[in-house]
């Protein structure tokens, strides 16, 4: 992830996933913060979506449910 285009692409795809309430991609930190309903969607789906777009996703079990890195 290295430009605003990547950010838009990721935000778009992740926001459209079922169960996602909010999705924030930060270019500076190369992180993805997703607010979601665990009953409807799982972290695995985020990782798969991110990887399908050509990025590498690393889960960080912190306050944020899922994060992506490139
Ligand atoms: Cu880019």
Image (cartoon, rainbow, N blue to C red):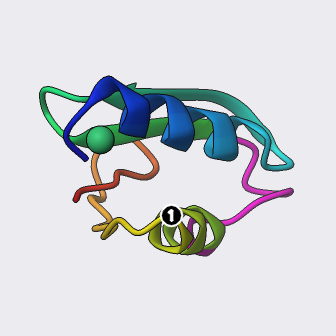
- Image point (86%, 49%), residue name: 18
Q: For mark 1, give the secondary structure.
A: loop
User: Residue 19 location, x and y as percent?
Assistant: 82, 45
Q: Is residue 63 visible?
A: no
User: Residue 32 location, x and y as percent?
Assistant: 38, 41
- Image point (41%, 31%), residue name: 5
User: Residue 14 location, x and y as percent?
Assistant: 64, 45
Residue 55, quarter of picture: bottom left
Q: Main secondary structure of the magenta part?
A: loop
| Quadrant that contains the C terminus | bottom left
Magenta span includes 39: yes
Q: Which residue corresponds to mark 1? A: 53
Cβ of mark 1 under 8 Å from ligand 1: the answer is no
- Image point (67%, 66%), residue name: 42
Q: Is residue 27 visible?
A: yes
Q: Residues within 10 Å of mark 1 (few under 14, many from 20)?
A: few
Say left or right for 13 vs 60: right
Say left or right for 56 vs 45: left
Say left or right for 17 vs 47: right
- Image point (83%, 57%), residue name: 39
Q: Which residues are magenta?
A: 36-44
């Amino acid at each position: 992830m290295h430009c605003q285009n990547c950010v838009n692409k990721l935000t778009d795809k992740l926001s459209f996933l079922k169960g996602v309430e909010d999705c924030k991609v930060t270019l500076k930190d190369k992180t993805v913060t997703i607010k979601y309903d665990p009953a409807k969607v799982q972290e695995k789906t985020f990782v798969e979506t991110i990887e399908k777009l050509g990025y590498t996703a690393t889960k960080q079990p912190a306050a944020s449910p899922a994060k992506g890195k490139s």
